[in-house]
Image: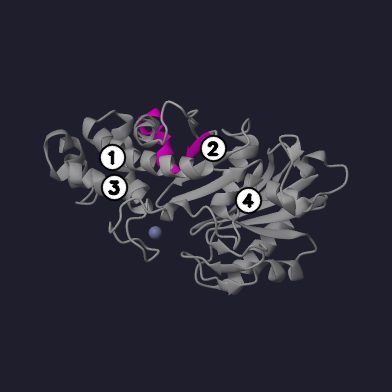
Amino acid sequence: MHAIGIDVGGTKIAGAVVDELGTIVDERRVATPVGDTELLETTIVQMVQDLAGDGPIAAVGVAIPGFIDAAQSTVYYTPNLPWRHEPIREKLEARLALPIVIENDANAAGWAEFRFGAARLVSDMVMLTIGTGVGGAIVHDDTLFRGGFGAAAELGHLRVVPGGLPCGCGARGCIEQYGSGRALLRMAGEVADAGGVGLALAEARTRSGGILSGHDVADLISQDDPGALVALRRLGRHLGEACASLAAVLDPQMFVIGGGVAQAGESLLGPIRASFLEALPARGYHPEPEFRIAELVNDAGVVGAADLARHHFPTPGDPNAFSAHGSAGDPATA
Ligand SMILES: [Zn+2]
């Protein structure tokens, strides 16, 4: 049976009807009405009603960029949206005659990669989403790892530099300050300031009115500009060290790297892998996990949210709803 996935972003809301194989059969996209919780809720309700049409829908998953409680009902906090301690699930259920579950957006994207993307053949994976910030998701033993309070896998706030740069979360030295798209722009600016290989970056910065944009840096990376690649290597080294710490705890078979910066492909994976291996405990005696770029670039949030909802509310006759990779799935279904 089909499920609906909704991905609520800071600028747009994407919605899709998704089948059991993770294929999108219908989709919608609207601008996010920022600043008004009532209107935001109504926009989601209308999108679900529109997508549901006449067809049977097993469940609805709503992916939200923020902290969600362990019961997957209440949004504690969303940095870029106005929800604070909002019982979203209850509110949406009151307006829609469908089972609803809410999920952190990075978890939804990670689940999509685990089920249908780069990590579909492993049981344990860690995904790092390198966008403006750094998001994360952990799948352990075919199950999405949510933690005791529902806020696990906030991997962007793993501390990599004690006493380092201040982070938006209130702490210092988080990987988000050293491994994100924003960090890449800062590092590219430093390479431009240093002259030498930074010449093309400095020229691009001048053309862009004194501030390097993500497009400037991505363009230069795609042209193998030596300065842009120096900045990308710095970013990759920090990410690789973070992955080594994560491997010491989680021992995944695979790291999946997603988000806009991951479009750099092997130019990013190479430095991550190199610094990972230098920092890996018991190197040479420990099987090495694979590093892969995410496959479901723009659709991961809606596909993952829909599939998690289907797992949460299994329907008879839908074998996919009960298991991932043919083994026991999410304990929520038990
Ligand atoms: Zn932080």
Please indicate whether residue 13 sits to the left or right of residue 57 in the image.
Answer: left
| Whole-percent x, y for residue 168 in the image | 37, 63
Residue 30 drawn at (x, y percent): 57, 56
Residue 144 got which mark? none
- Name the front one of labels 4 and 2: 2
Give the crowd class for mark 4: few <14, some 14-19, many >=20 residues within 10 Å: some
Cβ of mark 4 under 8 Å from ligand 1: the answer is no
Question: What is the C-alpha distance between the residues marked 4 and 3?
Answer: 32 Å
Residue reaching furthest to the top: 284
Q: Amino acid at mark 4?
A: Arg
Q: Amino acid at mark 1?
A: Arg
Q: Which residue is mark 4?
A: 28
In the structure shown, which secondary structural element does the residue marked by tag 1 occupy?
helix
Q: Residues within 10 Å of mark 1 (few under 14, many from 20)?
A: many
Q: Amino acid at mark 2?
A: Pro
Task: Establish if 329 lies above or below 267.
Answer: below
Q: Residue drawn 55% across and 60% down?
A: 151
Query: CA–CA distance between discs 4 and 2?
Result: 35 Å
> Reading the chain from its start, which is encountered first: label 4 or label 3?
4
What residue span does the magenta drawing correspond to?
254-268
* Residue 40 seen in render: yes
Which residue matches tag 1?
A: 234
Q: Which residue is mark 2?
A: 252
Q: Amino acid at mark 3?
A: Leu
Check disc 3 and report its element: helix, strand or loop: helix
Is the residue at mark 1 in contact range of ligand 1, meaning its CB lies under 8 Å from it? no
Residue that numbered label 3 is attached to:
185
| Figure quadrant of residue 13 | bottom right
> Which is more foreground, mark 1 or mark 3?
1
Rounded to the nearest angstrom, the CA distance separating label 4 from label 1 is 38 Å
Q: Quadrant of ligand 1?
A: bottom left
Q: Which is more foreground, mark 4 or mark 1?
A: 1
